[in-house]
Image: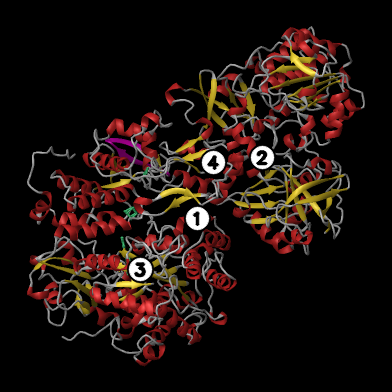
Amino acid sequence: MSDDMVTFNVDGNEVSAPAGKLVIEACEDAGVYIPRFCHHERMNPVGMCRMCIVEVDTGRGPALQPSCMLTVSDGMIVDTQSDVTKKAQDGVLEFLLVNHPLDCPVCDKGGECPLQDQTMAYGPGESRFVEEKRHYEKPIPVNDNVYLDRERCILCDRCTRFADEVVGDPLIHFMDRGNQTQVNTFPDEPFASYFSGNVVQICPVGALTAKPYRFKARPWDLAEVDSTYPNAMGDRINVQSSRDQVLRFQGVDSDAVNWGWLADKERFSFEALQSDNRIGSPLMRGGGLNKADADGDELVAASWSQALGSAAKAIADTTPDKVGFVGGARLSNEAQYAWTKLAKGLVGTDNVDAQLGDELPPHALLGLPRATVAEACQPGGVIVLIGCDPKETLGTLYIRLRHAVVEDGAKLIEITPTDTGLTNVASASLRARPGEAGTVARALLAETVSGHIGGVDEDALATARDLLGSGPVTVVLGRGSLSESVDSVLEAADAFLDVDGVRFLQAIGRGNTMGALDMGMSPGLLPGRTSLAAGQDAFSDLWPQLPNSDGMNTAAMLEAGAAGNLDVLVLLGADPINDALDPAVAAKALATVPTVIAVDLFVNDSVSKAHVVFPAAAFTESSGSHTNLEGRITAIRQKVTPPGTARSDLVIAAELARRLGHDLGLETPSDVWEELGPRSAVHGDVSSAAIEADVDGVLITATGRVAFAPPDQAVSREPVNAYALRLVTARRMFDNGTMVQQSPHLAGFAGQASLRVNPYDFNRVGVADGEEVRVSAPKGSVNVAARVDPGVPKGIVVLDYNRSGADARVLLDPGATSIDIRLESKGGKA
Amino acid sequence: MSIPKITTARWDVEDGHTLAGYERTGGYSALKKALEMTPAEVHEEVKTASLLGRGGAGFPAGVKWGFCPPGVWPRYLVVNGDESEPGTYKDRIMLERDPHQLIEGCLLACYALGLSQCFLYVRGEMAHGQERVAAALNEAYEAGYVGKNILGTEVSVDVVLHWGAGAYIVGEETALIESLEGNRGMPRLKPPFFPAAIGLYGKPTIVNNVETLSNIPWIINNGGQAFADIGEAPSTGTRVFAVSGHVNNPGVFEVEFGTTTFRDLIMGEEYGGGIRNGGSLKAFIPGGASAPWFFEEHLDLPLEKGTVDRAGSMLGSGAIVVMDQTTDIVKACHNVVRFFSRESCGKCSPCREGTSWLEKILQRIIDGNGRRADLALLMDVCDNISPGIAWPPKQTTICPLGPSAVSPIASVIERFADEFDAYLGEPSTEQAVEVR
Amino acid sequence: MARLNADNERIAHEIIGRYPRKKSALIPLLHLAQEQDGWVTDEAMSHIADLVEVTPAEVLGTCSFYEMFKRHPVGDYHVNICHGIACHLLGADELIHHAEETLGVKGGGTTDDGRFTVEGVECIAACTEAPCLQVNYRFANKVTTQDFDALIADIRSGARSDIPPHGTLAKTRQSIPEERAAGPALVEDAQEPAWLSRNGSDQ
Ligand SMILES: Cc1cc2nc3c(=O)[nH]c(=O)nc-3n(C[C@H](O)[C@H](O)[C@H](O)COP(=O)(O)O)c2cc1C
Ligand code: SF4
Ligand code: FES
């Protein structure tokens, strides 16, 4: 037995456990479950509820101890069944019940309530408490989605600990004292946390309930399956349904990924999937009376046969170089492979791009030595955050990073233009001016520097430099702002490549982007992280039409489409009108390309311009797998049937291939892995069975053959004009994205765009907080409400991206290193 | 043997609370002396003195001081001046009448242990005490006794006056630390960690009572052995007891520890002066409201920690509350239970729910709505808070507050069964409540 | 009113500066707010939250734990009559009853003229002087019903100017002269004090 194992005795059996393990968990591992309410494996123990007290003898005779606060030691004797233990636990249970209402029959938690279960199993039959119970106003909202019934609350501190410890949003708190203690918010300050739904999941009683599923179903009516939420983290979820409707997502505690947590954006998005706005049948252009008409100005229902025929004909009638495929990050790995095979192998075009030009380029996603989340979060490690704010874009990654810093002694160095959600736990925050992250990174890694570099002074750099040596370095990088070219982030990454043993974790925005790239959904790539040129041999047998020169990316396809040089544009869950960096070109392309084919769940602004629309099954409606930002492949499992005649993306690809006269050769997800495994340099170990077998899935660790390409030369920097402010465009958790907007309980959070300005600059403009200002950039201008934000440095302004009221894209210039703007109040120049 | 006044010597000195009065009566001589000694020597004197903590638990201060883990810095001193235990009234007088003595004691502790900062936590309601301590600190800073380079040496320690806002539980040392961190005063579970190892801001922290620290200057001036020579080991030195309730001469008295008896204090001419109106003793609380009650037969016990512990109670915070034959025992019992129920911090369920349940049952009995079965129920609820209802108490709770509510009930429910009966009326045939 | 005024904000910064962690100043700052307004307003709590860099919910969590902080207006004179065990034995209940009768209020209520709030409170550490009470935390000992009436009359007539308005605790504040301050012992500063390392210790 290794040194760090101890042997102890529980209920007469000798068992061993790692030293330092809590008795309650060590006993559970040994098959002895000790009842508990306040203990939660992902939070610090508080020992408040006292339900877990058991008799423990550490050599001085048996004594009652809370097993959630005590670690196992050699020779310890734990008795969970002794009379003293039982009496104490029964007593605690009775105490918890004296003020608890007996409304189990109408409580959402009834049927899955530990308190109810405990009471049924061990509790006293009849209450000895004849006094008046505590009374509170029945459920009060702590925010728009979460309701709190204080009468049911047993004050276990789980929700409040979660808010404080896990996500750093201590907006719900214990109030008052003693028998009057209650959980509440500050008056008129709701529990405005991106993660509020988690407290509903971890509440051991029915005190906290979520409006989106209050009273929708009783636990015993729910059927469930473990699956993966197809966001970039690949959060593990449990999908719960009743009568073929998804009613709830719960987080699944996966060690590797989300530890049971979910952001509200994911948790409450199940409503979108149930939305009446889902497309239930193929659609085609048509006019009055639902008649198909290629020039019609509406979309009308069509049969699969009509729609497939029409789409196939358009593709067959042109040359491969005039066909383009945009999107695909929504799809499962298997569907991505199927569509790539269709496009590149059968149609013969390399105009395939799952990305929309607003993230890190493929070589930066595939070509840097990659870290797992666990590696990034290792105790004592150093995390360098470059260019992005995980709290806004990758909720559960934020939680993991925060935990690493707050609980496990990791050090965080930020190189970001403004405060992020992690700033208050960061050891060093280097406020690099937009466009200058690379310069700052180089200065940080240089032996010494003097003066101001990229907005950061030498002392700050020196402090951060001291931290760098304290542990293994992981760089978390992403493209947080679209108003600076990606080169500055790439330059920063390049600088860090010189650090010994450095690894990278890319904070991707769109769901299955990693899978898409692994499946070759990018110009110049083939499945298995290989280039079009290098992969020819492996695929040529099954992919007869493989093109031999690189195709266009999204921006180029849209340009070509707008210029009349594209005949067919296939949108795979993409909405270029709202997502492409140049909205005018996107709109023009969609108006100009003769045949636009869309595969989607919803009719978004771009889909509404399509000629043929195929209704796709969502991730709760078809099975497959997902690749997260680490390269971890986990299972997506079907729970309900798709609406109407919607089909899985893979089947749609196969059907379209058939209409084009080919056999795609792929009918089920496992067909994909059987075909790909032998041909891919990195997917040899992957099979559907392997993915299914492990809650943590299959991690692809092999590196492919795509090399990181640092920017040619140091990014040139425009001097800052004294009268100008440098623009950051920032993604927020809630925006006008389809899933948010189709979820009634989330849509409202997106709100109006605002411009956040440092108090100093704000005063110079001379407007009131919330008043509209005019933002002028070389390319265009918008009006937007301005807000004071001390987290924004002087000389910088931050404009929300993809929110109503102001389209930040009119200011953007994709080629520019950075964008300087002028601010004017409606009354005049500042 | 005549016993010196150690902590109360200046109570009768008109200006004893001022720097001038303090210096005139030998003040700060111990500090000057200590600065000539090594820190270890100062600590050694305190160990030799066998000074038991005066806050309640009676743990030897010198031993506690040795628990700071080596090499972990900074270390803090927190002075417990939250005095709120019913019956207890000594720390407030020391704060008001001899604040410099306490400050000097703090400085000596800081010097001995390398404590880098001292927080003097005074109960919120003690406005006058805060004024006196603030004034004393201002004088002491001015005179160079406190702060940077104390008396021109390299010793630098700030003593910061901090004050509470009304919560008895904050007297418990881990709750005191929480409160000092700006939090709700809810105790931390100990073990695994005691404040000396992991305390304020997670750093080693010595928590001592006001009276405990007020003894230190005398000990340094006169030597630990001189202190140990007074009293009955390990209960050495003198102790200050407040005698209140139904006595002729309620008051606060400094007496020799370990030898003086309860009878001396309650009946003695120079102390309590006997039961008022020539009445008889019904019961007395020997060490603050948490302590199990004593009766006639305990009067001749000496005020010695070990002896009183073995007799089933404690000297606690040095508070003796005397009840004569006119006392309504049920109401007195309810009064003390109500105190603990109202002062429960609410962190752990047996105390939060159990103490208020006990209080409600007793109130119902007093209101004439009691059931005979309530007596067994009271005892069973007590047992679920403090399994076995023994002394020293076992507990299902985090801290000893919950079990404190058990003390009065367990003390009187059998002995004064007739008084409970009087409230309950005639025994009836109503069904017994099941007791598990 | 409501937020801390400029003077109090200055004092607040001074107090905050004494602690290794800002949040430690919470209770003193809440007292300061109560001293300013007679009670603790939501605005003051929000302001304090900003000053010590926590959320208002955390400030309220702490504030609401402690008996002395009033979150609604109370009388100019807060009369706390002790009903702890020693005072109970010597007639506290009768004194409370008398006070409530004469002032016409019950259980923490405030007189119509806003002058007096009367409350029975737990032991206030003057047990040998039972029954006792505090008016704005100033003691009156061995209070008979006549004493009580006289006290109220004195306050009404302005004869008790020694009792400050509700909220004021110590009339003397600690002030640490800058040049005399050792400074807070920062948690991050893992330094053995010079005098200890040089003199040798048993640590
Ligand atoms: C519920 C409770 C209340 C307490 N109240 C006080 C108090 O008001 N003053 C005090 O000095 N100690 C009090 N104590 C004891 C302290 O926890 C601690 O033991 C003491 O301050 C240590 O100082 P000493 O060793 O000098 O006695 C209390 C303990 C408990 C459990
Ligand atoms: S026993 Fe009472 S006072 Fe002590 S921690 Fe538990 S609830 Fe709080
Ligand atoms: S689970 Fe251990 S005290 Fe609550």
Q: Identify the element where label 3 is drawn.
A: loop
Disc 2 or disc 4, which is closer to the eye? 2
Distance of mark 2 from mark 4, alpha carbons?
16 Å
With B385 as the anchor, is B141 left or right in this view?
right
Disc 3 or disc 2, which is closer to the eye? 2
Q: Chain of mark 4?
A: A
Q: Earlier in the sequence, mark 2 or mark 4?
A: 4
Q: Magenta residues, as a range?
A: A4-15
Label 3 Cα neighbours within 10 Å, binned few <14 / some 14-19 / many ≥20: many
* Amino acid identity at mark 4: Ser
Q: Quadrant of residue A6?
A: top left
Q: Nearer the viewer, residue B152 or A726?
A: A726
Distance of mark 2 from mark 1, alpha carbons?
27 Å
Q: Are marks 3 and 1 on the same chain?
A: no
Asked whether residue C82 is in view, the answer is no
Q: Residue furthest bottom?
A: B24
Colouring scheme, one of rainbow, by chain, secondary structure, one colour: secondary structure
- Classify mark 3 as within 8 Å of ligand 1 or not, answering yes or no: yes
Q: Chain of mark 1?
A: C
Distance of mark 3 from mark 4, alpha carbons?
38 Å
Disc 3 or disc 1, which is closer to the eye? 1
Q: Which residue is mark 4?
A: A196
Report if residue A343 lies within the magenta region.
no
- Residue C120, given in percent of the width and then of the height, sits at 30, 64
- Residue B152, given in percent of the width and then of the height, sits at 51, 86
Q: Identify the element where label 1 is drawn.
A: helix
Residue C58 is labelled as 1
Q: Nearer the viewer, residue B421 or C51?
A: B421
Q: Main secondary structure of the magenta part?
A: strand
Distance of mark 3 from mark 2, alpha carbons?
49 Å
